[in-house]
């Protein structure tokens, strides 16, 4: 990775150097234009001011011309210094641009070889994938169909079990309802049986008392008959 980064930096530096060299030419021309414009501006400004200064006193003309010459020389020297400093900076960039231009063909060749290798790997992977599709396509489709059939069968079993569970719940509710009804009927029958037992007991007691009364009446009749016979 460090080599690639260095190569990338060299490539970017070469691009930067070409643009910097182009900017150097532009800045050099701009410096020349600035120098020419400054000289033209000086020439254009000297004439009207010289005509004006002729009307002034001699002492004032001398001082003004001295001040103007100092300003002109400082402006021209500043422009020349700027241009020389820019030429030094771009001179260093030119050395880097020449070195980057020498290294760029090797870097491009390495990138092209890497790209060719990647393309070859992609072609190999595509070929293997196609072979796998051809080899396992039918078997995979059959397995998928079997899996779908198993899922459908499972869904059918779940549906049947759900229906059976619902039916069992309904039957349970029906059985519970019938049990409650039978329990209620049993309680009613038990009450009726108790009532019948009570009435039978009452009837038996009534019959026994009636028989005793009849027997006592018969005995009284016999006693009266015996008394009547004795009197006769």
Image (spheres, helix red, strand yellow):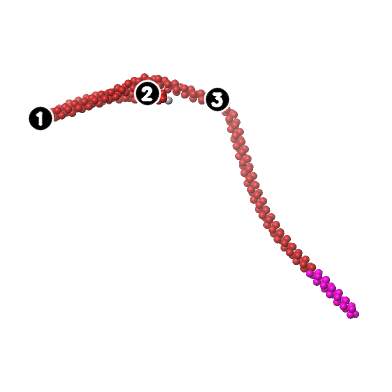
Q: Which mark is residue 59?
A: 1
The secondary structure that most of the magenta stretch takes on is helix
Residue nearest the viewer, comparing 104 with 7 = 7
Q: Which residues are magenta?
A: 209-232
Q: For numbered disc 1, what is the local secondary structure?
A: helix
Whether residue 44 appears in this view of the structure is no
Report the number of numbered marks: 3
Residue drawn where x is 84% and y is 73% of the image: 219
Instruction: Identify whether 107 is placed above or below 53.
Output: above
Residue drawn where x is 66% and y is 52% of the image: 176
Residue drawn where x is 18% and y is 28% of the image: 71
Instruction: Identify whether 225 is placed above or below 166.
Output: below
Q: Which residue is mark 2?
A: 10
Please tell me which of labels 2 and 1 falls first in the chain. 2
Q: Residues within 10 Å of mark 3 (few under 14, many from 20)?
A: few
Q: Which mark is residue 192?
A: none
Instruction: Identify whether 3 is placed above or below 199.
Output: above
Residue drawn where x is 73% and y is 64% of the image: 198
């Amino acid at each position: 990775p460090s080599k690639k980064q260095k190569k990338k930096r060299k490539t970017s530096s070469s691009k930067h150097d070409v643009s910097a060299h182009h900017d150097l030419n532009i800045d050099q021309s701009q410096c020349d234009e600035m120098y020419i414009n400054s000289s033209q501006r000086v020439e254009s400004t000297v004439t009207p001011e010289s005509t004006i200064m002729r009307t002034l006193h001699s002492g004032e003309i001398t001082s003004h011309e001295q001040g103007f010459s100092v300003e002109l020389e400082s402006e021209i020297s500043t422009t020349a210094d700027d241009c020389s400093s820019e030429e030094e900076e771009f001179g260093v960039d030119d050395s880097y641009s020449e070195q980057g231009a020498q290294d760029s063909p090797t870097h491009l060749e390495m990138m092209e070889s890497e790209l060719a290798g990647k393309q070859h790997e992609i072609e190999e992977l595509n070929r293997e994938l196609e072979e796998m599709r051809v080899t396992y396509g039918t078997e995979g489709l059959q397995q998928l169909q079997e899996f779908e059939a198993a899922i459908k069968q499972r869904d059918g079993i779940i549906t049947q079990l759900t229906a059976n569970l619902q039916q069992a719940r309904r039957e349970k509710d029906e059985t519970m309802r019938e049990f409650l009804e039978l329990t209620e009927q049993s309680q009613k029958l038990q009450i009726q049986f108790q009532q019948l037992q009570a009435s039978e007991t009452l009837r038996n007691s009534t019959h026994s008392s009636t028989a005793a009364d009849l027997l006592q009446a018969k005995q009284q009749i016999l006693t009266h008959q015996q008394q009547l016979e004795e009197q006769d």
